[in-house]
């Protein structure tokens, strides 16, 4: 696919009247869309039909190891978080060797100062936690976070766009889209059946996880333009954020999987890959259930699809390198963490990082024949009610 056109748009971002109404943005260029909305729908429909969910077990770092600790984004996103709690969060992250601390914008500078000289980086949430803020608000927040020293941004997708079409009634931020993942099984079975069919009468099935060439290269005839979600609006926002915050800034897109059906998760993953995001992430932890095994398996399968060259996708993946997957929301124990890593996640967003590391050391001690039975203590960073 061609790269996004960096030419500034003359038309406003959805939700905004014009650039002059947002003087705080300055010289930020709103990216031109790559395809028409119907073309996006065709590409996404192809993705939805070709991907087969893999349920293989991936390699995971040994529990308690340095590599294991480096999968954890140590997180504190409560609105009432205090400076003292942020200082403790940073101290814990430095001591345990976590990959990052993940906080809100108002504490980025403090975290950067606290972590100076360590390997722990600072991540900032953007558009948290609804994701429905207008594009300019997200751009301002992203720019401010990077200026304050954040090297990773966890950006909330405006997932409500995916559950709306031009003919549907707009949903409020309290609307609950289908939270069920039960359609993953049927979708996988259907795709697997298509993928097992022979090609051109040959006795061998089509290769890899891809369906027959051309099986979904265009929109299904029953789909109409007015029934398509505004994929263009999502892509434009994501591509503009990527342009504003180029590598080495790491961008993670929070999908809020509890609010999306599996096909919608695949649509969001496709758009994230097209916009060159580094991660797709499950949840904010503040809206419905957190990460599930099914979520991770689906997202990992999608990430692999987008970076794999095969004859069946014409050797043209959406992006040249593999997106990674971050599991977040409800990961509060060592078994939770191991399950997500073995499903293919490479990063864990949790407020229970300290508890997980203490638990891993206890398990290792027992395996080595030790008699330590003093269990780890849950600290304030473990949010057992809401959030991470």
Image: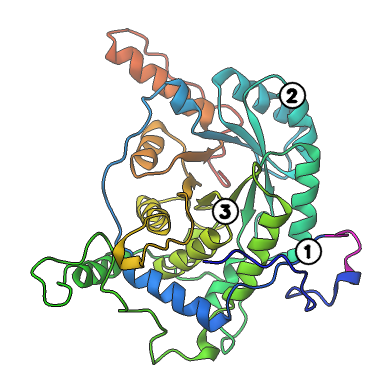
Q: Secondary structure at mark 3?
A: loop
From the image, give the main secondary structure of the stretch colored magenta. loop
- Find disc 3 in the rendering and name its residue: 277
Q: Is residue 23 magenta?
A: yes
For residue 213, above or below residue 3: below
**Quadrant of the rendered image containing residue 208:** bottom left
For residue 304, above or below residue 180: above
Q: State whether residue 173 appears in this view.
A: no
- Find disc 2 in the rendering and name its residue: 114
Could you give the CA–CA distance between mark 2 and mark 1, rounded to whole angstroms?
Answer: 33 Å
Q: Which residues are magenta?
A: 21-27
- Find disc 1 in the rendering and name its residue: 29
What residue do we see at 28% from left, 15% from top? 367
- Callout in the foreground (2, 3): 3
Of labels 1 and 3, earlier in sequence is 1
Q: Residues within 10 Å of mark 2 (few under 14, many from 20)?
A: some
**Quadrant of the rendered image containing residue 14:** bottom right
| Residue 375 percent coordinates (x, y) | 42, 19
What residue do we see at 49% from left, 57% from top? 319
Would you say 140 lies left or right of 379 here? right
What residue do we see at 88% from left, 59% from top? 26
| Residue 214 percent coordinates (x, y) | 32, 78
Q: State whether residue 19 appears in this view.
A: yes
Could you give the CA–CA distance between mark 1 and mark 3, rounded to whole angstroms?
Answer: 18 Å
Residue 175 or residue 9, whichever sits in front: 9
Q: Is residue 232 magenta?
A: no
- Callout in the foreground (1, 3): 1
Would you say 85 lies left or right of 273 here? right
For residue 56, above or below residue 274: above
């Amino acid at each position: 696919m061609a790269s996004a056109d960096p030419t500034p748009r003359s038309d406003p971002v959805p939700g905004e009247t014009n650039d002059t109404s947002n003087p705080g943005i300055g010289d930020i260029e709103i990216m031109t869309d790559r395809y028409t909305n119907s073309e996006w729908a065709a590409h996404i429909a192809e993705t939805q039909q070709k991907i087969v969910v893999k349920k293989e077990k991936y390699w995971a770092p040994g529990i308690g190891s340095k590599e294991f600790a480096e999968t954890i984004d140590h997180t504190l996103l409560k609105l009432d978080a205090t400076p003292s709690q942020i200082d403790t969060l940073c101290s814990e992250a430095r001591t345990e060797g976590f990959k990052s601390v993940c906080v809100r914008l108002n504490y980025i500078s403090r975290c950067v100062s606290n972590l100076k000289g360590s390997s722990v980086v600072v991540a900032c949430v953007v558009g948290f936690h609804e994701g429905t803020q207008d594009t300019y608000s997200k751009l301002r927040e992203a720019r401010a976070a990077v200026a304050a020293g954040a090297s990773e941004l966890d950006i909330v997708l405006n997932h409500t766009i995916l559950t709306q079409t031009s003919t549907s009634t707009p949903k409020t931020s309290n609307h609950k889209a289908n939270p069920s993942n039960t359609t993953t099984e049927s979708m996988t079975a259907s795709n697997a059946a298509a993928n097992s069919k022979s090609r051109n009468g040959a006795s061998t099935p089509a290769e890899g996880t891809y369906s027959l060439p051309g099986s979904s290269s265009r929109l299904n005839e029953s789909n109409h333009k007015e029934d398509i979600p505004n994929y263009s609006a999502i892509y434009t926002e994501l591509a503009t954020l990527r342009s504003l915050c180029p590598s080495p800034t790491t961008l993670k897109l929070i999908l809020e999987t509890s609010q999306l059906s599996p096909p919608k998760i695949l649509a969001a993953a496709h758009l994230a890959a097209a916009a060159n995001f580094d991660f797709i992430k499950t949840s904010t932890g503040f809206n419905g259930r957190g990460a599930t095994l099914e979520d991770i398996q689906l997202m990992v399968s999608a990430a692999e699809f987008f970076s794999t060259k095969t004859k069946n996708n014409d050797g043209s993946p959406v992006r040249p390198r593999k997106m990674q997957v971050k599991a977040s929301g409800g990961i509060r124990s060592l078994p939770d963490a191991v399950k997500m890593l073995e499903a293919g996640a490479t990063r864990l967003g949790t407020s229970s990082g300290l508890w997980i590391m203490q638990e891993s050391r206890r398990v290792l001690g027992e395996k080595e024949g030790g008699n330590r039975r003093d269990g780890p203590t849950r600290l304030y960073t473990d949010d057992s009610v809401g959030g991470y």
